[in-house]
Image: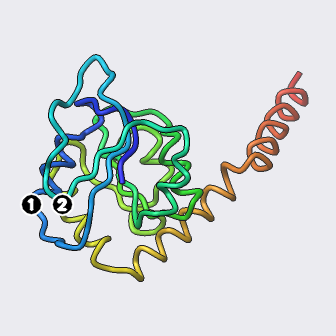
């Protein structure tokens, strides 16, 4: 699954190229998003093995229905959809950019790939979708990562610690 704007810089072209190069006859790529962007990817509907859905605020239903999440962005900061997918226990494939490089430990709680590499992405998709045990392990670790570092309690504790540090230094 991918969720976001269908913009070129989100790596949709890389994802579609990777998807078309792998042979997983029982798998479907679900794209949830919108072409309402300054730099749309172009035609993505009607491709074999690809389901396209419009943007929704109810991504939870999709997270519960899929086996993995992918964000092959060329440019990205801290992606909410990656945080959400990991919180839902999904293994994530993401490019080595922005916060994904800090959030995901390659092979531990997700898989990292090189930017603009449909070859790396195809290899990661085949590896992940062909190994149920790996999906389970990465998904469990992804959830643990989010709960430990990004749950509201953890974030508040970090903020309070920082305020105390600042206060002590004044």
Q: How crowded is mark 2: few (under 14 residues within 10 Å), some or many (20 or more)?
A: many
In the depicted structure, whether residue 64 falls above or below residue 158: below
x and y percentages locating residue 105 in the rendered image? 45, 60
Label 2 close to label 1 by CB (< 8 Å): yes
Q: Residue at x 48, y 76 (%)?
A: 137
Q: How crowded is mark 1: few (under 14 residues within 10 Å), some or many (20 or more)?
A: few
Query: Disc 1 marks which residue?
Result: 21
Res. 89 mark: none
Left-right relation of 74 to 85 = left
* Residue, far top: 38
Query: Disc 2 marks which residue?
Result: 122
x and y percentages locating residue 92 in the rendered image? 41, 58
* Residue, far left: 21
x and y percentages locating residue 170 in the rendered image? 89, 21
Left-right relation of 22 to 169 = left
Q: Along the polypeptide, which appears first: circle 2 or circle 1?
A: 1
Q: Which residue is drawn at 13% across and 65% down?
A: 22
158 or 86: nearer the viewer: 86
Q: Residue at x 42, y 83 (%)?
A: 133
- Coloring scheme used: rainbow
* Front position among marks 2 and 1: 1
């Amino acid at each position: 699954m991918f969720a976001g704007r269908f913009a070129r810089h989100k790596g949709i072209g890389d994802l579609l190229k990777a998807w078309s190069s792998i042979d997983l006859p029982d798998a479907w790529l679900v794209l949830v998003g919108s072409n309402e962007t300054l730099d749309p990817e172009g035609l993505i509907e009607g491709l074999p093995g690809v389901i396209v859905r419009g943007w929704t605020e109810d991504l939870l239903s999709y997270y519960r229905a899929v086996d993995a999440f992918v964000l092959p962005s060329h440019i990205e900061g801290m992606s909410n959809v990656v945080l959400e997918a990991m919180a839902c226990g999904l293994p994530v494939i993401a490019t080595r950019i922005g916060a994904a490089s800090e959030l995901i430990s390659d092979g531990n709680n997700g898989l990292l790939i090189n930017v603009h590499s449909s070859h790396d992405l195809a290899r990661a998709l085949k590896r992940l979708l062909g190994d149920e045990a790996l999906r389970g392990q990465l998904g469990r670790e992804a959830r643990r990562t989010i709960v430990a570092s990004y749950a509201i309690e953890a974030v508040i504790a970090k903020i309070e610690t920082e305020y105390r540090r600042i206060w002590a230094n004044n």
